[in-house]
Amino acid sequence: MVFNKPGWVVCHPSKHGPMSSLVGAAREVFELKKIHLVSRLDRETSGLVILAKSSRMARLLQVALAERMVQKHYIAFVKGEMLERIEVSKALGKDPNTSVFVKQCVLEREGGQKAQTTFKPLEFRNGVTRVAVTPHTGRKHQIRAHAEWAGFPIVGDKLYGPDPLLYLEFIEHGWTDRHEAVLPMKRQALHAQSMEFITEEGVFKYEAPVLADMETYWARCAVAG
């Protein structure tokens, strides 16, 4: 089962009932006793999420993930003009300089997890670049942390954008006037566009078009200023 998940949808089941998550809703709507989450996304990230209805298919795709026989491609909007392809090969780990527990950062010292991301600029409009992103590893918040380190934070990112405290403020108070003033989108402009699994039973490739909220923002960028 392949979904083009909107932003703000949680993947994992939660305590708020079956319809509060993608997995729970899929199980309820399709009357499935068991379902396997093959790939997941952060709540605010849109795009491809894959669920398997059988243990056999779940195992087939998860083995490909474990053996890095999967190619993933994302679309992101980043702040600034990216003029050329950027390869970031920097280890990631918990950020020691922030009060936000979940925030990751590039660690120049030993101890981080190896991570590699490719950013390829596609088009520039009024201070924003549309970028094709290929994560070669699968670390927590990898694309967002590497984009921040490279000097091109993702548009709308509350945690890896202008101030990580925006993330805590949003959790406590929701969308505020300060968010409205500094964040041009209400979610991070990151979309999982395609995945290709190379397995012993063949190649499985899935694609999901960029969703309307990101395309609407990109259209506004063409006339901004």
Image (cartoon, rainbow, N blue to C red):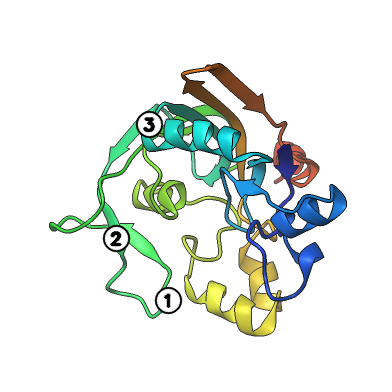
- Whether 195 is drawn above or below 201: the answer is below
N-terminal of the pair, mark 2 or mark 1, is: 2
Residue 103, horizontal then vertical, whole percent: 41, 67
N-terminal of the pair, mark 1 or mark 3, is: 3
Disc 1/disc 3 C-alpha distance (Å): 30 Å
82 to the left or right of 108: right
List the residue tagged with mark 1: 100
190 to the left or right of 7: left
As drawn, the residue found furthest toward the bottom would be 172
Residue visible at 67% across and 27% down? 207
Does residue 172 appear in the picture of this structure? yes
As drawn, the residue found furthest toward the top would be 202
Mark toward the viewer: 3 or 2: 3
Mark 3 belongs to which amino acid? Arg
User: Residue 115 occupies which quadrant of the picture?
Assistant: top left
Q: Which mark is residue 68?
A: 3
In front of the other: 111 or 98:
111
Mark 1 belongs to which amino acid? Val
Mark 2 belongs to which amino acid? Gly
Residue 158, horizontal then vertical, whole percent: 55, 65
- Mark 1 vs 3: CB contact within 8 A: no
